[in-house]
Image: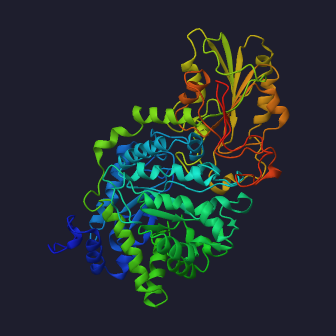
Amino acid sequence: MGKVEEDMNCIYRDPNEPVEARIRDLLSRMTLKEKVGQMTQIERRVATPDAIKDLSIGGILSACGSGPFQKALSSDWADLIDGFQKSALESRLGIPLIYGVDAVHGHSSVYGATIFPHNIGLGATRDADLVQKIGEATALEVRATGINCTFAPCVAVCRDPRWGRCYESYSEDTEIVRKMTSIVTGLQGQLPHIHPKGYPFVAGRNKVIACAKHFVGDGGTDGGKNEGNTISSYEDLEGIHMAPYLDCISQGVSTIMASYSSWNGCKLHANRFLLTEILKDKLGFKGLIFSDWSGLDRLSEPRGSNYRSCISSAVKAGIDMVMVPYEFKKFVEGLIDLVESGEISMARIDDAVERILRVKFVAGLFEFPFTNRSLLDTVGCKLHRDLAREAVRKSLVLLKNGKDPEKSFLPLDKNAKRICVFGTHADNLGYQCGGWTMKWSGGSGRITIGTTILDAIKAAVGDETEVVYEQYPSADTLARQDFSFAIVAVGEEPYAESLGDNSKLVIPLNGADIISSVADSIPTLVIMVSGRPLLLEPLLLDKIDALIAAWLPGSEGGGIADIVFGDYDFKGRLPVTWFKQVEQLPLHIGIDSCDSLFPLGFGLTCNKERSLD
């Protein structure tokens, strides 16, 4: 065990002892420096063996895309992370690391992993069992790489599609979001029938530590501004935005992340009332509270100024593990000084470290700190890709099917003689996956392994069918008279967080012009690939024959072809209200939305059925 104490009376090393006894024993052996080290989470780029051992660092994370090297295999990730764990175990007390990653729609930093639809698409399925299975699959792929924690699920209730994180929300409807929290059980395992209220739970080394985020109200900010201000009464905050956290806590969620946003002008990272008095005391949450990435820096203007005060405000408010992520020595030194000067009590430090150790013990990290390499083959396996394809099928929402109500346009004939496929999103896997895929803001092209919409169409049609593809339709192609129909896939470029804040919500990349030019010449199905509703002018909507909201479907485009050519029927229903004009926003459940383009819950089927919640 290297430098680890050989004292046979170390209760904390005995897995047969109660977790709380192990916590007390280990806490009693720790110096202030080691306690503060446990409260520190750093980015893997600065995680040297000396820093991990000397400071007893509590957590490391890989920012989205921060892997061993480009297109690293799952085994390469495992080697990297096992190396970090080895360093942690060589520290004086041998405390293993929480290693976190943003596996928010599958293990999306790893090349070749299964990429599931983003949350807004899963909300369209209304299928809690499916979402739980996605959690189970994601847990296996994450643990296969040696990682033991995912910063998921996001349980925000998005009330405004102008928000750059709209696609990370399952719905504008609190009850739909609550239903989708079943992913927590998928990630962490089924809670025992008798389990202490609010106590964290992880079922074993094939499960991961989950993180409900971002507490609280991040989907309700004024104007949909990311990191903005949610203006509401406590009753509305509790009833609309806090309710899904109760469901997560009841499933034993181990960690919760504080929001960058504010509530009535008070930043959540410094809000003791919400983090401590409500979340910890009233709701009884016994796990740990993470800060968000550099969340403390945002507590002052300009960012990062008056850092000592920022540390004090956040830790006093109830933040337990602080995602620094780079200048961690400044944080460690600052927090130690605050404790030694008496500004922060040792009781607050001990509370934070108790919570961190509780999660580590519950997750079995002391007994199984290293990668379970028997799981390596699960990453991107056929079983998981089939599950993702099913999720795509169930997430698609049919918004229009034929110009004549008595004559459906879909399903399309897969044996048609000649068809054309157009659009910026028809053959772009990166666009199809969206943000938080291979890197923070996503990417374009074949950024990972998967099936594009065009790939899927070509695989689905008959041997005698000719498929003509152009990203941007040429005049010569549009002038031809021998196409049975056209499929146009357009939508949003990938984005994340504030980069996605958008006050206009027009279809990017000249999407409306592409649709219009094709639909003027050829009977047209439009597949909208986006993280939220986009502006559809009446004249444009009238031109097209059929319209599908495909959201951000991920790596398995085959699920789209399954539906379009009639192997399966549509089941998806809108998880958000589709506006007519951006001037109407915010427009959501609880507001008179009778003037929407399509209401929450709307969805057609090829059997001419119309769904509405």
The reply to whether residue 44 is in sight is: no
* 267 sits left or right of 587 in the view: left
Question: x and y percent of residue 399 in the render?
Answer: 70, 33
Looking at this view, name the residue that lies furthest to the bottom. Answer: 341
Whole-percent x and y of residue 367? 25, 59
Residue at x 40%, y 33% (from the top left corner): 383
Q: Is residue 401 visible?
A: yes
Quadrant in which the N terminus is drawn:
bottom left
Q: In this orientation, which residue lies closer to the viewer: 471 or 535?
A: 535
**Which residue shows up at 57% across the image and 35% down it?**
429
Image coordinates of residue 499 in percent, x first then y, are: 67, 54
Q: Is residue 328 left or right of residue 417?
A: left
Q: Nearer the viewer, residue 47 or 30?
A: 30
Closer to the camera, 239 or 350?
239
Occupied quadrant, residue 333: bottom left
Q: Residue at x 84, y 35 (%)?
A: 538
